[in-house]
Amino acid sequence: MKKNLFFLSMAFLFASSASSFDWPQSTVVQSDQFYSYFGQNRGETISNSLIFSDPSEVKAAEDGFVSIIIGDYQDENDFFPSTLGNAFIINHNDGLLTVYGNIDQSSVEKDFSEFAEIEKGTIIGLSGNTAWQQGHSSLEFQVIDIKNNTAINPRLLMPRVGKELPLYYQEVYLYNKKGNRFKLGPQNVIPAGSYKVYKKRQQIAVPYSTSIFINGTLVDKISYELLRQEDNLICVTGNKNYTKQLLYPDEDLMLLGELTLTPGKSSLQLTLTDILGKEAPAIYILSVY
């Protein structure tokens, strides 16, 4: 089973033909009906989990062996927070781990033990109410690449069923280094300088990528294929690694990328892309002085 990270940037082009994980629970969820998506704002960090919408039987997504069984677990590592609740971690031959969090311990019928082999489709137990999403008894699923110290978007390796949540712009802002904010409209007069581009955050949907073009030239692109860990903090990657504090500075905003504006008239194009490659563009005319 090939899941080489070198090819993940083209994952949506070949996902239908490449080997992939089985569905990690018995109940199939439509693509637009997950409770929370990979890359979403989650308290003090960026979520490296895909959280399912309804309780269900949880099953192994691929052959492997049980690496860790988490009960009352405490650890400062960002990839394995105690908020997983009761969880199983399965190690696969390709250097990936799959993590199944929020398991109801009383529903685990089989006497699982660490380092025991487990086959694809083996029922682990029922999703429970032991993890971060208290009151929401559903599976929290993660895919970790232990060789590259990254978390992979689980949806790249899972079957996709149904339509995607629409991506849209409500409000878009430029923030310069002085903290000045400029709300963008059809025509804009902006001082030259370096800017961070933010849009009002959608509460559930997360783009597969966000791109910024100036006069047709790509200047930044943030990808949600995977999350990296740097100095024990989870980051997304664009022109640099963006931490939670940059990506989600508050509950309302989401970073689209960074740019530098020079004097003159410019066309700023923003593009939100979903996991199927569907794009949502927006164009703003800037008069830069």
Image: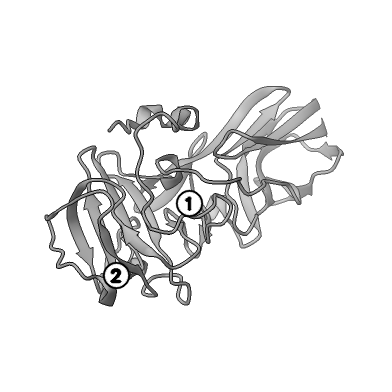
Residue 9 left/right relative to 255 = left
Task: Report the quarter where the C terminus lies.
Answer: top right
Residue pictured at 56% horizontal, 36% vertical = 276
Mark 1 residue type: Phe
Depth check: give the residue in front, 261 or 65.
65
Q: Residues within 10 Å of mark 1 (few under 14, many from 20)?
A: many
Pointer 1 or 2: first along the chain: 1
- The image's mark for residue 57 is none
Quarter residue 96 falls in: top left
**99 to 18, vertically: above or below:** below
**158 to 25, vertically: above or below:** above
Residue 239 at x, y percent in the picture: 52, 34
Residue pictured at 56% horizontal, 56% vertical = 33
Quarter residue 227 falls in: top left
- The image's mark for residue 86 is 2
Mark 2 residue type: Asn
Residue tagged 1: 38
Residue 140 left/right relative to 121 = right
Quarter residue 269 falls in: top right
Residue pictured at 39% horizontal, 58% vertical = 26
Please say whether residue 288 is visible from this viewpoint. Answer: no
Residue 237 at x, y percent in the picture: 47, 39
**267 to 179, vertically: above or below:** above
Separation (CA) of disc 1 from disc 2:
20 Å
Residue 43 at x, y percent in the picture: 50, 65
Q: Residues within 10 Å of mark 2 (few under 14, many from 20)?
A: many
Residue 138 at x, y percent in the picture: 43, 67
